[in-house]
Image: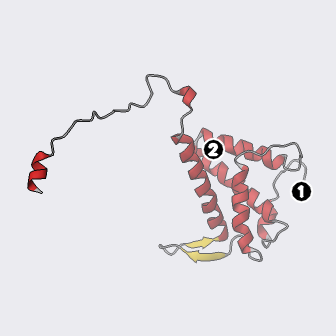
Amino acid sequence: MSNNRILNFSVLQEEINPNNVLAISEIIAFTQTRFLISYMGNRMQKIYADLYADIKHKHDINHIFSDGYDLVHEGVLYLCEHYGEHINDVIGYSKKGKQITIRTMCIRKMMKLINRDSRDYYRHTDIDNITPENEPLIEMREEIDSDYSQCDEIV
């Protein structure tokens, strides 16, 4: 591998084993985040840039990994179940008869993590950013004493 390339794509042709599982997962996560930039926008672009920096500086002892590197770990966990197989081996078929490969399932595992994180990101609001205009409106119901005498007579 040359110094100006951080990813070695030839590893995708090899059999999955403990020595190359991290490299395969990095490539899948890197290509998938790049693909998702057009769908998810700035947030995915930041994850992509952080993931690039993480892969580039993974051997630096002082480097702090970003949340994007969790995608790589998720991929490694899935790929460890498939030692001895190739990334493009078919492991099943969809309801429509389409082939499902190990790579496809690895991407699906990563997408679950991405979707969960993006849902949490859009759902949570920083308390410092709330102004009186966009503060959630909470309606309190006034308690009214109800007369249950008619119900008591029926019972």
| Residue 146 higher or lower than 22, as above or below | above
Residue 127 drawn above or below residue 27: above
Q: Closer to the camera, 151 or 31?
A: 151
* Label 2: element kind: helix
Which residue does the image show at 63% across and 76% down from the upper left? 91
Quarter that holds the N terminus: bottom right
Residue 16's place in the image compared with 129, above or below, is below
* Residue 155, quarter of picture: bottom left
Left or right of 69: which side holds 62?
A: right
- Colour approach in the figure: secondary structure
Q: Position of residue 108 (x, y in %)?
A: 60, 62
- Which residue is tagged 2? 44
- Residue at 83% over, 51% down: 6
> Which residue in the protein does label 1 denote?
1
Q: Position of residue 97 (x, y in %)?
A: 50, 75
Q: Amino acid at mark 2?
A: Met
Q: From the top left corner, tell me how far across and down residue 111 is, in percent.
A: 60, 56
Q: Nearer the viewer, residue 138 or 98?
A: 138
Relative depth, front residue between 63 and 148 = 148
Real-space Cα separation, disc 1 to disc 2, in angstroms: 27 Å
